[in-house]
Amino acid sequence: MKLDRNRQKKILEYLFITKLFTFFIFSLAAFSEYMKFVDYKFTTLIYFSDIIPITLYMLIMLLTSRLWFASIKFEKNSRKYRTVQILESLINIVLFSLLIAFAPDVPQYKLLFLLIIITSSLQYGFKHGMTVSAIASVIVLAIDLLAMPEAIVNEAFQDDLIIVGVFLLTAWLLGFYEKIEREHRESITQMAIIDGLTGVYNHRYFFETLKRLIGNAKKTGAHLSLLFIDIDHFKHYNDLFGHQEGDEVLKEIAEILKQNTRPQDLVCRYGGEEFAVILQDTNEQNALIVAERIRDTIEKTEFKGQEHLPSGLLTVSIGVSSFPDKAQSDTELVKSADDALYRAKFFNKNRVETYFSILQEMKDDLKDKDITLLTSIKTLISVINAKDRYTYGHTERVVMLCQALGERLNLSEEDLKILKYSAYLHDIGKINIPEQILNKKLPLTKEEWDIMKQHPANGVRIIEPVESLDKVKPVILHHHERYDGEGYPDGLKGEEIPCLARIMTVVDSYDAMTSNRAYKSKMSFEEAIEELKACSGTQFDPEITQIFIELLLDLHSCRTKNMCEDKTIEKYAVQMSL
């Protein structure tokens, strides 16, 4: 956690100051001993010979300081961290050993080992501190024996046994304190980052870790994928069986998520009945495999009372997005995964959907100067979706049906692209429509209809600066014209209406018929087909309407009877709920 990292940083800063102080004392002692053997007149020859050991010492100081800075940056338990830890300790031990060997009769120098033992125990823990203290003890006693090899009673050795005891006791006390303090800190940290009910990571830790992992992925060029998982009809389940049984379901699903992901993946409770899974070093294709495995496992798991749910099973919907293919930051990744989850919930539930944005596809066709404008348009669409969730689902279905109808009509690649972009942007003008009108439950008044009818022209004005979308503008402007000339905004009739706008009109109207709106209930599939036939030649182009009806019947047959001879039809049938 950020608070713990800041605390650790402060401790390391104080240890760094202590190490500098240690080197300062060592420098004074070393210089004092060195000056006993040099000529204080500093003749030219001796002056240059003095530079060599002093320069060597300064280089060692710089190397050790560099190691200290490096140890702050590396992750604990990493190979680099352990290497720095060993090198630093070796350099310190060698330097202090040389000083003691040079002046074995000065007991104060031996006590300087305490500074190394203290910093090692506090920074690197119990084992490392005890190891350093043991090595220091052996060195001190060995120097005593070597300094007085023929002595019958080695008084220095006897005296230094007390110093050795102080070394070991200091390392043991500080190391043990560091161990207890670290375990306590880890326990508190776990409580702060773990969801108390499910045992997986919580919402706060999810965002902290995702930001860090995205930063790492940017540096290394690695892929990272995100799954958003929502339990279908969970509110209904809670209403039937109570929150205690609902909590048991949450625990069970959390366990399924952990069992179906790797140790390095991060399973989090995002909120309520929603979970998130961060898949490290995983591209979108592999993330979809993981998501489908999770969905299938949960569908096949038997939960208490699941037969009373609308589908007879307890299922989940999953949205998938990935970095860097579908998002360039942690915020974009969360938004895109949430968008994909909404697609999965909207289209029948119990399914996996990946993030798809036509605007991303449009970037390839836009001029460089239009890219910034496209980003603004994307933001506007997000605002519309927040104001009117119907618009989001409606737009998605219109895009898919327009593409399917365009292929059935053998449109050129260019016209298909224009139709698809138009379908995606056709309701962007609703940004200027008040929310109370968009979500009104009663039929609109004449004044309100007049405001609503302005959205095609509003949409064209919004994309007006984007020259690359010039061919899209007429489709957006005229997608509410009628074949008999009674439509808006210009009252165009028959062939006067652009062909792509006529295609859009029939698809847009069909989806409006078969969707629940705030002010009316949706028609059944059969009722909508009859309505299309009744309005053919008046509201809709009769030729386009007939081909569209045939397409809908094929899609419906594929969905309900599993009779899909056409692979293209099968693809759209799987994507859509009819």
Image (cartoon, rainbow, N blue to C red):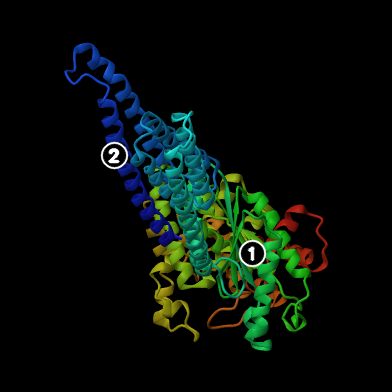
x 64%, y 64%: residue: 318
**Spatial separation of the CA atoms under disc 1 and disc 2:** 60 Å
Residue bearing mark 2: 24
Residue sitting nearer the eye, 143 or 310:
143
Where does residue 72 sit, x and y in percent of width and height?
A: 42, 46
The local secondary structure at tag 2 comes to helix
Give the vertical position of 316 relative to 320 (above or below).
Answer: below
Three-letter code for the amino acid on which mark 2 is drawn: Phe
Residue bearing mark 1: 318
Residue sitting nearer the eye, 238 or 165:
165
| Residue at the limit of the structure toward the left, as seen here | 41
Crowd class of label 1 (few under 14; some 14 to 19; many from 20; radius 10 Å): many
- Look at the image and tell me whether residue 498 can be seen: yes
| Residue at the limit of the structure toward the front, as seen here | 152
| Residue at the limit of the structure toward the top, as seen here | 45
User: Which mark, by number, is residue 509?
Assistant: none
Give the vertical position of 197 relative to 330 (above or below).
Answer: below
Residue sitting nearer the eye, 177 or 445:
177
Which quadrant holds residue 530? Answer: bottom right
Question: Which quarter of the figure is the C terminus placed in?
Answer: bottom right
Three-letter code for the amino acid on which mark 1 is drawn: Ile
N-term mark: 1 or 2 = 2
State which mark lies toward you, 1 or 2: 2
